[in-house]
C-alpha cells in the first residue's frame, strides 16, 4: 500500500540533498585543512632504529608535533635513508633535507673549528665534555658553525669514546704496522692514524661491515654503540680500549628553514630540541653500559692499551695539523676544569 504523503517526503529529500552535500564538503575540507601540517621537516641520521640517536630524534618529532598543534611534522629517516652524512649535509643547504646529526664532518664546510668537538685526546672524560660542549666554548663553536655555514646547531649529543677494533690484539701504536683502517671522511683522523702507523681509509659507515667481511679493510674505530648497531662484533674479534676520542655530535638544522618559521614555531623547535638533548643524555648513560655488556656477551675481547703512547703520537699529529687559532681553542678546552 502506498502512503498518501510519499510525494511530499520525496520533495523534502530533494531539497535536503544539496544541503547535506554542501555540509559534507565543508566538513571534509575543514578536516583536511586541519590535518595537513604547514611545515614538514626531514630529519636524517646514520644510526639504526634501536640507537639512542633515533629514539631521541623520534622524541623531538613527537614534541614538535604536540607543541605546534600539528603545524609542523618531523619525518625521521634512520640508517642513512636520506643519504650518507656528507650528502645529507649538502642536502640541508639545497633544501632536500632539513635536520641531521653530525660532528667533525662539518669541517668540510670551511668550519675548521668544528673538529674541536672530536679531536683526539682533547676531552678527558664525560664531566669535562659537558662543561665544554654545554658551556661558553661550546656556544662559541656553535656560533662559528652558524655564521659560516648556514647550519644551525639546535642540540648536542654526547658520544661514547671511540675505540679501535681489529682481528688481532694491539696494545701499542707500533703494532699497527700499516693496518688498513676505516676512518670517517675527516682529514685530521687520516693524519692522526697515519702518524700512529696505520693506513687510514675514509669510508661511509654503511660500507664498513662488508669491507671488514671481505678484508678490504682490517679494522675501524667507533664507540660501542656503533660497533654493536653495525654488527661489527661479527667480523671483529678485539676491541682496543684506546678511548682516543671523547666527543659530542650536533643536531643541525637548515638556518634558512629555521628563519622562515614564525617566531612561535621557532620557539617550538628550540624547546623541543632541549627536551631531545636531555632525553638523549639519559639514554646515553643507560646504553653505554648495556652496549659494552652486549659486546662482551657476543664474544668480543677488550684489550687494555698503552694509552699514553697513543696520546703522545696522536697529540703530535694534531698539533702539526692545527692552525694557530685551532691550537689556541684546543688549549682553552684542555684548561676547562
Image (cartoon, rainbow, N blue to C red):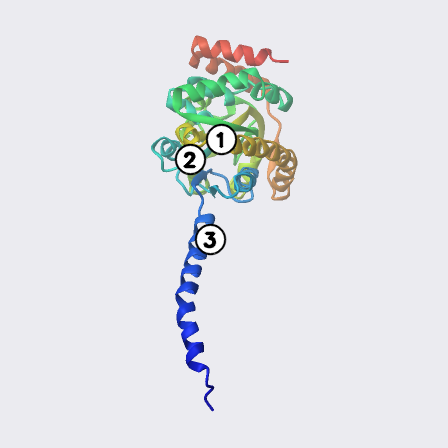
- Tell me where residue 150 appears, x and y as whole percent: 39, 25
Give left or right: position of 230 versus 200. right
Taking 137 as reference, is 66 above or below it? below
Residue at 41%, 58% in the rendered image: 25
Q: Report the side of 183 relative to 238 (left or right).
A: left
Point 57% across, 26% down: residue: 242
Identify whether 111 is placed above or below 54: above
Give the CA separation, mark 2 to mark 1: 14 Å
Instruction: Give the residue number, with chain letter if any, for mark 1.
Output: 266
Residue holding disc 2: 98
Q: Position of residue 305 (x, y in %)?
A: 60, 25
Quadrant where the C terminus is found in the figure: top right
Give neighbour class at mark 2: few <14, some 14-19, many 20+ (Cα, 10 Å). many
Q: Secondary structure at mark 2?
A: loop
In the image, residue 157 lies at what x, y percent?
A: 55, 30
Residue 31's disc is 3
Question: Quick one: 86 or 141, which is closer to the camera?
Answer: 141
The relative height of residue 42 versus residue 325 in the rendered view (above or below) is: below
- Count neighbours of disc 1 (C-alpha within 10 A) and say few if under 14, some if 14 to 19, many if 20 or more: some
Question: Residue 312's image quarter?
Answer: top right
Circle nearer the viewer, 3 or 1: 3
In percent of width and height, residue 272 lies at 55, 34
Check disc 3 and report its element: helix, strand or loop: helix
Return the disc, 3 or 2, that comes first in the chain's sequence.
3
Amino acid at each position: 500500500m502506498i502512503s498518501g504523503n510519499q510525494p511530499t517526503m520525496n520533495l523534502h529529500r530533494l531539497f535536503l540533498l544539496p544541503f547535506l552535500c554542501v555540509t559534507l564538503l565543508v566538513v571534509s575540507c575543514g578536516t583536511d585543512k586541519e590535518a595537513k601540517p604547514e611545515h614538514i621537516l626531514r630529519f636524517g641520521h646514520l644510526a639504526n632504529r634501536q640507537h639512542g640517536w633515533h629514539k631521541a630524534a623520534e622524541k623531538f618529532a613527537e614534541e614538535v608535533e604536540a607543541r605546534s598543534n600539528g603545524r609542523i611534522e618531523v619525518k625521521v629517516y634512520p640508517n642513512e635513508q636520506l643519504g650518507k652524512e656528507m650528502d645529507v649535509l649538502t642536502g640541508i643547504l639545497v633544501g632536500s633535507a632539513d635536520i641531521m646529526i653530525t660532528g667533525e664532518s662539518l669541517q668540510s664546510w670551511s668550519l675548521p673549528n668544528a673538529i674541536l668537538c672530536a679531536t683526539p685526546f682533547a676531552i678527558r672524560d664525560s664531566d669535562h665534555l659537558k662543561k665544554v660542549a654545554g658551556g661558553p666554548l661550546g656556544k662559541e663553536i656553535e656560533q662559528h658553525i652558524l655564521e659560516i655555514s648556514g647550519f644551525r646547531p639546535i642540540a648536542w649529543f654526547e658520544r661514547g669514546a671511540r675505540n679501535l677494533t681489529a682481528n688481532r690484539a694491539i696494545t701499542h701504536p707500533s703494532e699497527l704496522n700499516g693496518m688498513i683502517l676505516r676512518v670517517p671522511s675527516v682529514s685530521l683522523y687520516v693524519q692522526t692514524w697515519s702518524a700512529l702507523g696505520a693506513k687510514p681509509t675514509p669510508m661511509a659507515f654503511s660500507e664498513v661491515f662488508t669491507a671488514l667481511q671481505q678484508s678490504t679493510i682490517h679494522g675501524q674505530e667507533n664507540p660501542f654503540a656503533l660497533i654493536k648497531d653495525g654488527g661489527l662484533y661479527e667480523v671483529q674479534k678485539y676491541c682496543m680500549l684506546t678511548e682516543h676520542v671523547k666527543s659530542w655530535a650536533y643536531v643541525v638544522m637548515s638556518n634558512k628553514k629555521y628563519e622562515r618559521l614564525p617566531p612561535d614555531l621557532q620557539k617550538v623547535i628550540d624547546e623541543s630540541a632541549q627536551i631531545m638533548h636531555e632525553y638523549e643524555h639519559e639514554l646515553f648513560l643507560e646504553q653505554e653500559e648495556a652496549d659494552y655488556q652486549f659486546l662482551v656477551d657476543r664474544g668480543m675481547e677488550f684489550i687494555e692499551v698503552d694509552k699514553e703512547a697513543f696520546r703522545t703520537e696522536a697529540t703530535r699529529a694534531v698539533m702539526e695539523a692545527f692552525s694557530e687559532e685551532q691550537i689556541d681553542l684546543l688549549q682553552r678546552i684542555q684548561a676547562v676544569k
